[in-house]
Amino acid sequence: MEIAHNFMGPGATKTMLRINENGNVVGSIIVNCEGFPETTTLDSLTAATYSNHMRNLSHHASNALKEIDVTDELTVLRLVSRKSEAVVAPDSEFHIIVVMRRH
């Protein structure tokens, strides 16, 4: 959580801990601008897999949104499946990904 504190300020660590306290949250990941997980509560393989794929999806979604309306900007991307869902909040310096179980 030190990376979260250093990159995003002192409130980031508390926010990450609070998010992970939710019973449906499997884990969270902070991904740097190169696409590598910096801080995660998941195992390294799972974090790397989600980081790579969700970063790519958010990039493609952002480009598609810009083609529709150049003045709009992607703020959150939510991917829902039968078993789980992943939410990514992209930024120019980092992405935050939260993985949750579905009921």
Image: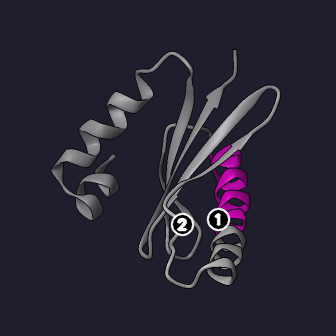
Which amino acid lies under the numbered mark 1 shown in the image of this protein?
Ser
Residue 90: x %, y % from top left: 50, 64
Question: Looking at the image, which is closer to me, 52 or 73?
Answer: 73
Of the residues under marks 1 and 2, which one precedes in the sequence? 1
Residue 16: x %, y % from top left: 36, 39
Task: Answer with the quarter of the image where residue 55 lies.
Answer: bottom right
Would residue 86 be found to the left or right of residue 18 on screen? right
Note whether 27 is above or below 64 in the view shown.
above
Task: Answer with the quarter of the image where residue 63 lies.
Answer: bottom right
Q: Which residue appears at 72% of the width and 63% of the height?
A: 57
Question: Dot 2: within a 10 Å radius of its alpha carbon, few (fewer than 14), some, or many (20 or more) residues?
Answer: some
Question: Looking at the image, which is closer to me, 83 or 20?
Answer: 83
Disc number placed over residue 43 in the picture, else none:
none
- Please provide the residue range marked out in magenta: 44-58
Note whether 68 is above or below 82 in the view shown.
below
Task: Answer with the quarter of the image where residue 61 lies.
Answer: bottom right
